Image (cartoon, rainbow, N blue to C red):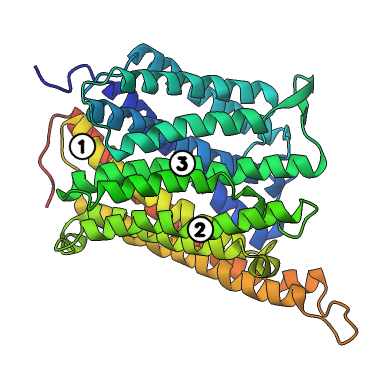
């Protein structure tokens, strides 16, 4: 009997397709709000204004595209690494429906202005409870699959999967603790500096448990699958894993430097943030050393480009992040456009490139066909990288100029530039950023067309790849 018979492939397909839909929504909204900043007249209050659309953009990107894809590949990888069918395929189908319901409700409620004003935790309590239910179903299903596994050894990917399941649950429940006063309004269970501290303990560890551990799990699985070479050192990967999990938990307060949060908390976060360079770059080196004598695949294997560029962006991200956690540098770039440049190198460069590779690899396997066009995949890759670099570099330059102007003083100590003077200087960079977003959107459309044609030809019963 085929080992893959009984695997929850239909559920995986569903999550992949819906994650691509929500990812498209996120990019479309991202391009729209970038133009709203560059051309304020495009804001149509109250519903089509930057303030309403921006949280929908972040939630659709992080949770719709990111979490949706991670759910697909966590199921896909766990079944294959454990050589065990998913504990409950029926539960997974319920999870898929509830997941899409939660994302849709998030979009509607945020558009209506129902917002807790907490970054990455904006959803009001009824929707937040639904999100928690979805995650519990997901976690129980995967943990039970691992418990009942037929393969004794646990590959590093499974450790990242389990860390994500536990970490996200703890973070989400603690930070979303609130006091409901109506069906559409609640207040945080914490107050003042404590609320800020809990929020950014959650906020930065959401980066850890949503935008770091899941793509690393996927990277460690799909790099050997797509290149045919083993990971350089599983031991180094495991040491880096435990170091990463331990260090990340202490870093959230680096978002609160120069605030009323106690200095020792800020210093602790700063120290652990710098230490994070080591385990982060261990993953980068693991990827690079795995490619020893195989670098020709960067030319010949379109999937290798996505994965190696992805882990490279991760390496750059994890140098910038610790640097930004140092008080003096934070004082200069915090509250400037440098920050979105940094964030989008991670989301568009690191996370998305790895997910694109995983989708390109798995969709033909799931549909028993071949990718429609490798040339289109190559075009997608270069457009995505170009769009992301235009976005990030324009924002980094804008952030440096903005930081310099905001900190410039006259001989008497007064500020040399007003806030409005600094903002006027940012418009050219916002135009460039919007253009970079359009380039990335075009790359996404190429990707969607390629995947659509791949699935269509599979359903038509043809598997030959066009020249």
Q: Which mark is residue 364?
A: 1
Which quadrant of the rendered structure holds the N terminus? top left
Is there CB contact under 8 Å for labels 2 and 3?
no
Q: Which residue is mark 2?
A: 275
| Towards the viewer: 410 or 388 | 410
Residue shown at the point (43%, 42%) measured from the top left = 213
- Image position, residue 450 (x, y; %): 28, 45
Q: Which residue is mark 3?
A: 23
Is there CB contact under 8 Å for labels 1 and 3?
no
What is the secondary structure assignment of the residue under circle 2? helix
- Image position, residue 276 (x, y; %): 49, 55
| Towards the viewer: 13 or 223 | 223
| Towards the viewer: 140 or 454 | 140
Can see residue 51?
yes
Category of crowding for the residue at label 1, using alpha-carbon neighbours closer than 10 angstroms: few (below 14), some (14–19), many (at least 20): some
Residue shown at the point (67%, 30%) measured from the top left = 176
What is the secondary structure assignment of the residue under circle 3? helix
Can see residue 360?
no
């Amino acid at each position: 009997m085929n080992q893959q018979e009984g695997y929850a492939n239909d559920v995986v397909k569903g999550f992949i397709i819906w994650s691509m839909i929500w990812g498209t929504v996120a990019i479309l909204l991202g391009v729209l709000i970038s133009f709203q900043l560059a051309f304020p007249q495009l804001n149509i209050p109250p519903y089509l204004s930057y303030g309403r659309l921006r949280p929908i953009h972040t939630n659709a990107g992080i949770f719709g595209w990111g979490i949706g894809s991670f759910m697909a590949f966590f199921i896909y990888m766990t079944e294959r690494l454990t050589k065990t069918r998913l504990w409950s395929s029926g539960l997974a189908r319920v999870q898929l429906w509830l997941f899409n319901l939660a994302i849709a409700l998030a979009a509607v409620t945020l558009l209506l202005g129902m917002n807790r004003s907490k970054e990455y935790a904006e959803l009001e309590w009824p929707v937040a409870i639904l999100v928690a239910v979805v995650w519990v179903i997901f976690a129980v299903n995967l943990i039970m699959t691992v418990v009942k596994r037929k393969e004794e050894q646990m590959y590093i990917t499974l450790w990242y999967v389990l860390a994500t399941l536990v970490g996200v649950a703890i973070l989400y429940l603690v930070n979303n603790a609130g006091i409901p006063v109506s069906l559409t309004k609640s207040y945080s269970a914490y107050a003042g500096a404590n609320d800020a501290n809990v929020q950014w303990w959650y906020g930065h560890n959401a980066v850890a448990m949503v935008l770091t551990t899941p793509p690393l799990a996927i990277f460690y699985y799909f790099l050997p699958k797509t290149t045919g070479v083993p990971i350089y050192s599983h031991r180094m990967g495991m040491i880096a894993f435990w170091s990463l999990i331990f260090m990340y938990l202490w870093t959230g307060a680096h978002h609160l430097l120069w605030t009323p949060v106690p200095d020792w908390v800020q210093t602790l976060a700063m120290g652990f943030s710098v230490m994070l360079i080591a385990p982060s770059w261990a993953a980068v080196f693991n990827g690079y050393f795995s490619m020893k004598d195989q670098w020709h695949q960067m030319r010949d294997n379109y999937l290798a480009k996505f994965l190696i560029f992805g882990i490279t962006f991760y390496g750059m991200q994890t140098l910038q992040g610790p640097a930004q956690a140092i008080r003096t540098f934070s004082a200069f770039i915090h509250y400037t456009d440098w920050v979105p440049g940094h964030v989008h190198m991670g989301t568009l460069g690191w996370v998305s490139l790895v997910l694109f590779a995983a989708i390109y690899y798995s969709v033909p396997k799931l549909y028993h066909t071949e990718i429609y066009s490798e040339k289109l995949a190559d075009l997608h890759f270069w457009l995505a990288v170009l769009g992301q670099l235009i976005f990030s570099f324009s924002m980094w330059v804008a952030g440096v100029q903005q930081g310099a102007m905001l900190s410039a003083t006259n001989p008497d100590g007064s500020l040399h530039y007003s806030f409005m003077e600094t903002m006027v200087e940012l418009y050219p960079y916002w135009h460039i950023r919007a253009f970079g977003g359009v380039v990335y959107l075009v790359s996404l459309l190429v990707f969607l067309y390629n995947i659509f044609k791949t699935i269509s030809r599979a359903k038509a019963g043809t598997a030959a790849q066009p020249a």
